[in-house]
Image: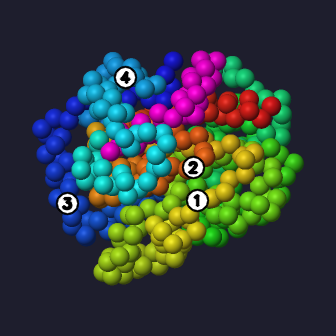
Amino acid sequence: MCIILRAGGRPPTPSDNAHHSLIWKRAQSYPLKISVILSVMLLSACSSLTVEDEIVAPRRRDCTGTAFFMESLCEDEIALLGEAAKDRLAAGDIPVNQEAFQRLTKARGVEYATAVIFQRINGTAQTQNYLKKLNDAAARIRPGTFPRTANKKLMLAMVPGMYYNSNASIGGDGAEIRASARDLGFTDVLVNVNPDGSVEENGRFLCDWLSNYKEYTIVLASISKGASDIKRGLQLCGEKGNFDSVRGWLNIGGINRGSYLINEMDNYWWYRWRAKYFFRREGYSYDSFLSVRVDKTSLLYEDVNIPKKITVVNIIATPTWRHVTRRAEEAYTILSDYGPNDGLTLLADSFIPDAVNVAMWGTDHYFSVPERRRLMLYAVLLDFMERLR
């Protein structure tokens, strides 16, 4: 059973290409750019595991190919992925480097570069073995008869996305992840970080929060900006004992090094001024918002030392143009100047060294392809349970 994705999709048609060209031209308009950035970062709440998007249907149809631990692939997708597997940047011993994939994008296009980074991530022996484990776990799951842990002290602690309190309806609070964990017998808790808090503020909050739950064995889960908060927490107190009870981290669509969309907005004074006005009117902190921009001199951009006892599973959305939802399409186009992306952050920046990195082909930052999503969550969480017995 292949659990990672029913990819679907059809080869782009002339009308698709015309639409893509139109979007690209519109994205050059900075008035549009500011509206895109604000709507993506604020109204969409940074990552959803529940949103269904009508744009998916016209670009997808059933295909029958099976390859690379995926089913329902179209023939041209298999051909693209096969060609990408031969690219030198797909080699497992080559570091995942944003500049290299940006150059590849300029030379071969964003779709080819996306396929290469997918193969670089999923082609490693570590990820291949993990995918086999997930398939085995999925085969043992029957809804309504879930294997349950007898350990009542096993906790799934959800670190949510930005503005999650205003966007629970689209998954900002990780409700689907928590429900999946609860079905399997975890104690599930929402970590109530400040929805409008900076990475620094929320990292400190997490350090304090963890110190109150040392009697539990904890698997942290995060979506979008929640990953930034956990990363900062590890930098602040990862070696001080606060994370002693943490044995796992499930990171889905994490913003691990910031988002260039914020840079695009803040670098132009007119749009920066308009954004500040918007934030003040809505009661949001503009400085907190800027804490998730890309700054290569910042602590957020640096790699983090993760204690060896913490198993990190990092799920990276890996879309090509046909897979991008309406919610993400214009942001995806803007970010394509920087390289392969999920519609909110770059794929190279999503990669976490020393983690089990898994690329999900065919979905953008909002994980709106529903067919195998819940089964994937059950399998990943079941694997964590079995590791912690």
In depth, the one of 117 and 53 nearer the eye is 117
Which residue does the numbered mark 4 point to in the structure image?
A: 72
Q: Position of residue 114 (x, y in %)?
A: 35, 43
Q: Real-space Cα distance between discs 4 and 3?
A: 32 Å
In depth, the one of 367 and 339 nearer the eye is 339
Q: Which mark is residue 134?
A: none
Numbered disc 1: secondary structure: loop
Q: Position of residue 333 (x, y in %)?
A: 28, 54
Q: Residue at x 63, y 70 (%)?
A: 200
In depth, the one of 88 and 49 nearer the eye is 88
Return the disc, 4 or 3, that comes first in the chain's sequence.
3
Q: Real-space Cα distance between discs 4 and 2?
A: 30 Å
- Amino acid residing under circle 2: Pro
Q: Which mark is residue 353?
A: 2
Which residue does the numbered mark 1 point to in the structure image?
A: 303
Return the disc, 4 or 2, that comes first in the chain's sequence.
4
Callout count: 4
Which residue does the numbered mark 3 point to in the structure image?
A: 26
Range covered by the magenta-colored residues: 113-140
Q: Main secondary structure of the magenta part?
A: helix
At label 3, counting other C-alpha atoms closer than 10 Å, the crowd grade (few under 14, some 14-19, many 20 or more) is some
Return the disc, 1 or 2, that comes first in the chain's sequence.
1
At label 4, counting other C-alpha atoms closer than 10 Å, the crowd grade (few under 14, some 14-19, many 20 or more) is some
